[in-house]
Amino acid sequence: MTRLITSFIDGEFQSPDGARLFDKRSPVDGRVIARIAEAPQAEVDRAVQAARAALLGDWGRMPMEKRSALLHAVADEITRRFDDFVEAEMADTGQPAHVMTQVFIPRGAANFKVFADVVKNVPTESFRMDTPDGRGALNYAIRKPKGVIGVICPWNAPFLLMTWKLGPALACGNTVVVKPSEETPLTAALLGEVMAKVGVPRGVYNVVNGFGPKSTGEFITTHPKVDAITFTGETRTGTAIMKAAAEGMRDVSFELGGKNAGIVFADADFDAAVDGIFRSAFLNTGQVCLGTERVYVERPIFEHFRDALKAKAEAVRYGRPEDHHSTYGPLISQEHRDKVLGYYQRAVDEGATVVTGGGVPDMPAELKGGCWVQPTIWTGLKDDASVVREEIFGPCCHLRPFDSEDEVVALANDNVYGLSTTIWTQNLTRAHRMAERIEVGITWINSWFLRDLRTPFGGSKQSGIGREGGVHSLEFYTETRNVCVKL
Ligand SMILES: NC(=O)c1ccc[n+]([C@@H]2O[C@H](COP(=O)([O-])OP(=O)(O)OC[C@H]3O[C@@H](n4cnc5c(N)ncnc54)[C@H](O)[C@@H]3O)[C@@H](O)[C@H]2O)c1
Ligand SMILES: N/C(=C\C=C\C=O)C(=O)O
């Protein structure tokens, strides 16, 4: 069945009449599974106007308790329709069911629940000051919603990443105009059904589909009535959006690219480290910004670790996401597959030893139209090889031995990105010391992608601007104002 996806504006799905439609193809077999209406500038304008009207209507006047309860109702409806969201996201991404049911879709409800509560429990400051007349003055801060937030989303964990922004944005009383990635429109449309069902006022949640430059994404980021922009995607796209946001001085929150290091010391719990690095390199077919593409292993265990990781990579089971036998899916698109295969070739050109993979698996005829590549492990490259320095965003990693803590800290930090790292050692004094020295926003010790949504999340260097999570999201999605009262 080919679905038709149109914009969701002011509480309703828009008519496709006259719309320019583009195809959404299954990453699994290349079939067209949906036709998507590209929102022209006039439609983006209507979405922004609807979002502004909602700020001045019921939503803007809604008490926090009621807003919080409504977002809990959204979370509960997502949970009630859990299987629908799993099915939609599997159709969009081709990723196996366990990636959806265990990781990505549960976060949809969690992202609303956590922030529906955070907004009620985070105080604002107050200061009493002395004054020359001796009677003093009282200062207190208040938080006000920023207004209409432009939300620009990537394709790699569509529902998780969109709701990671929507939860706090709406909990703080803002309204949103969302552009899902052109590759993954389905769950954002499904969320429109949820919003309407639970009674979120019209205009609070608006979705417009399309592309970036000279299309829907740019129409949002350049719209003068969009008050702030939160974006997740490639660093170079962030540069373009930041330029657009400068006009009108709009605030931005960016979660960008990464080239994350995994560091394994000889004293690590070996099996746990192999499992952890395997997950961080190959989960979601390596399409996770927090994923590991550079693995540094202390020399005494290097060969044993390499062989153990190779065995796990060669044991993945390709297949359709709905087939519970499948443990490994395709890349999101042929374009991205060509990019990843280009790096596979470049690695060989730069002198890599291909420990495993490096090409395209021999798929059954019915799946040959999909975006399949082999999980790949390299060794032997120089530290300045492009495969070691540039984000590939695929199921591949380069293993390199190291001999000292200072050496591996220097290697890990020698990159333009600074998003995350995962360190495996049973010497926790060393782990804490390392966490201080590695220049990233998030460090996991003997773990990876373990997420407490109250903690600061974001990248250093070219991996992002700002932090979201817990009170940090409130800092971005509200304007804090000070009131000074003369006593
Ligand atoms: N730091 C994080 O938490 C995080 C999380 C997920 C993904 N990412 C990064 O995202 C990238 C993969 O996602 P992607 O390929 O969708 O990224 P992308 O930058 O190509 O696209 C992201 C979104 O931006 C839109 N867009 C593109 N150009 C635009 C423009 N000029 N103006 C407005 N919108 C524009 C796209 O249509 C899409 O919706 C990787 O680099 C990955 O590291 C980072
Ligand atoms: N932003 C988050 C995850 C990012 C995943 C990147 O691919 C999150 O866990 O909140």
Image (spheres, rainbow, N blue to C red):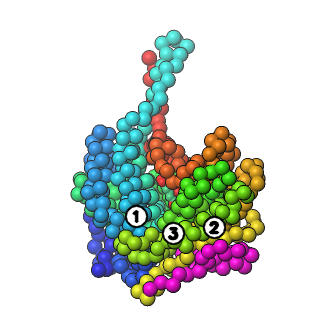
Figure check: 244 above or below 470? below
Residue at (65%, 54%) from the top-left corner?
A: 264
Q: Earlier in the sequence, mark 2 or mark 1?
A: 1
Which of pointers 3 and 1 indicates the residue nearer the eye?
1
Which mark is drawn over residue 98?
1
- Quarter of the image that includes the N terminus: bottom left
Residue at (72%, 79%) from the top-left corner?
A: 349
- Asked whether the residues under the numbered discs 3 and 1 touch, taking CB atoms below 8 Å apart as contact, a structural biologist would say no
Q: Position of residue 270 (x, y in %)?
A: 60, 55
- Asked whether the residues under the numbered discs 3 and 2 touch, taking CB atoms below 8 Å apart as contact, a structural biologist would say no
Magenta segment, which residues? 336-364
- Mark 1 crowdedness (10 Å alpha carbons): few <14, some 14-19, many ≥20: some
Query: Three-letter amino acid code at disc 1?
Result: His
Query: Three-letter amino acid code at disc 2?
Result: Asp
- What is the CA distance from the residue labelled 2 to the residue labelled 1? 26 Å
Which of pointers 3 and 2 indicates the residue nearer the eye?
2
- Asked whether the residues under the numbered discs 2 and 1 touch, taking CB atoms below 8 Å apart as contact, a structural biologist would say no
Local secondary structure at mark 2? helix
In the picture of the structure, the residue carrying the numbered disc 3 is 285
Lateral position of residue 59 relative to residue 437, left or right: left
Local secondary structure at mark 3? helix
Residue at (56%, 57%) from the top-left corner?
A: 271
Figure check: 18 above or below 76? below
- What is the CA distance from the residue labelled 3 to the residue labelled 2? 20 Å
- Mark 2 crowdedness (10 Å alpha carbons): few <14, some 14-19, many ≥20: some
Find the residue positioned furthest to the bottom: 365
Which mark is drawn over residue 307?
2
Figure check: 53 above or below 46? above
- Is residue 90 visible in this depiction of the protein? no
